[in-house]
Amino acid sequence: MDLSVLAETAAHPSPPADDPEWWRSAVIYQIYPRSFADGNGDGVGDLAGVRQHLGYLRDLGVDAIWFTPWYDSPLADGGYDVADYRRINPAFGDLAEAEALIREALELGIRTIIDIVPNHVSDRHPWFQAALAAGPGSPERERFWFRPGRGERGDELPTGWVSNFSGDTWTRTVNADGTPGEWYLHLFSQQQPDLNWNHPDVRREHEDILRFWFDRGVAGVRIDSAALLIKDPALPEVPAAPGPGEHPNQDRDELHEIYRNWRELADSYDGTRVLVGEIWLPDIDRFAKYLRPDELHTAFNFDFLARAWDAGELRASIDQTLAAHAPVGAPSTWVLSNHDVTRPVTRYGRADSSFAFAAKRSGTPTDLDLGRRRSRAAALLTAALPGSLYLYQGDELGLPEVEDLPADRIEDPMHFRSGGVDPGRDGCRVPLPWRGTASPFGFSPDSAAGEPWLPQPAAWAALTVQAQQSDPASMLWLYTQALRIRRAEPGLGDGPLSWAEAPEGVLAFARGGAFLNVTNLSAEPVALPAHAAILLSSSPLDGGMLPPDSTAWLRTQH
Ligand code: NOJ
């Protein structure tokens, strides 16, 4: 299909209809718009900046980009507090620019996925403002979870549910006459009131928002907090050990009906518009239920990301993930990081390289060389696994977590709500270094008036795109080669995997008839199995042996 013709002839183009199964093997690059590139020089990334760098993404070899929320928002939670789902944040651009971006990306063969935030809105959203103004008992309040407090004076929280950002999940309102009023529910910050998904307006509005963006050519949506939308209306306390479907605000059975409706809506468009769930659930079989053929297409597999750099752990995660996806026929996703978690170069450089929110996130001794070596190995390992692959901006440059941000620059509510115990997520959201030897490293134009909204470490001079593009030993070079091979190699992407025999601490598996991935997580170099050629290696071989913390891709037949 000639995409340039498509772009010229359609005001709101459809994604290319050539491959309805594109999402099963896609490489999806996550853009955090505030930190990708600043086109207008105010120190904040924007859509103009993204448009300037679409060629970079094409050359990197990605199939799609996923934008974290780009909507109008007071940014109380980095944009996951949406004030208007049909308006672009003026700091990022406007709707016409978003439409141009979707079109230009398509001309380069890159689809656009956007973030949909259905669990909550911003406290500045007109619905919430109307609910506050209308007062207790009003229909406007029915779209949210307003409740009187417990206790004689109503000053006790309606439930003891704990926020996903730590702290309480209820905030008390003030009545028009100044007296203390009802409380409203927010599973995240108090600027993010939860919507009541039993209300028909809420369902209708979100289906309308999906149509609004599908009509503008987006190829899919990433659904924020996808397992949280439904609450038990009786608002019981969370049981000590909730059984399947028993948690009052997570993974409730009624969610599936919502996603079946969304799937029908998505399927009514051409070109396969995908639904991707952000679902953190410990029960992988419950997780897979969201991926039945008439529900979501895929969901983020966070289990792999949370595991330590250990052969047994990673093998168990791969096996469990593939086994859980097989019965529903959905491809797995592979995710090393995103805008919520510690950058892999830092995480894998720690003695305990597993990930958990609010734990082990700062002040932990880190060997960045080790972390970088393991991240390179992990990049090839995940790119060789069956299914789609997510790549968070900056991981292709091997950026480490920035752990010494000045206290007065931190914005993440996770930091503040934990009383400062959790350093928050700003350290993985620092603006990208593109070129040059000093901040802003080409993130903003040279003439820029504003500083980058978060300060960039001076040491990033060695990690700019420009520095890495000409260095075959760089992370960027490795990713570019890996994605090129992945696209050309018939066995990679979606499809079967078969484990091969390997020494203790080594993960070896075949994809297709002539491709083998070998990842050495042991402490010793290992001999490579018989091969016709080495396609790519994350570290230089050591006398023909694969060093520890390395992955090699082998051609096994002539
Ligand atoms: C998950 C998003 O990835 C995260 O950044 C956000 O804070 C929460 N959902 C709440 O929307």
Image (spheres, rainbow, N blue to C red):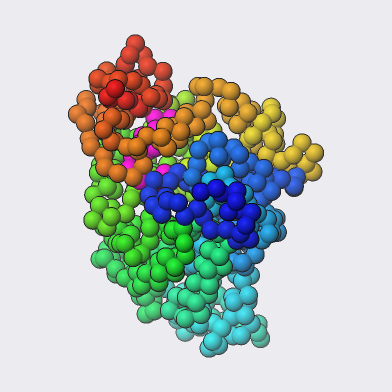
**Magenta segment includes 384:** yes
* Residue 242 in picture, x, y percent from top left: 28, 65
Residue name at image x 23 percent, y 56 percent: 327
The answer to whether one can see residue 290 in this image is yes
The answer to whether one can see residue 66 in this image is no
Q: Residue furthest top?
A: 543
In the visual, does 447 lie left or right of 329? right
Between 119 and 427, the residue placed more toward the observer is 119
In the visual, does 457 lie left or right of 19? right
* Residue 186 in picture, x, y percent from top left: 50, 68
Q: How many marks?
A: 0
Residue name at image x 28 percent, y 55 percent: 329
Q: Is residue 142 above or below residue 274?
A: below
**Magenta segment includes 138:** no
Q: Is residue 231 above or below residue 505?
A: below
Magenta-tinted stretch: 376-389
* Residue 381 in picture, x, y percent from top left: 36, 34
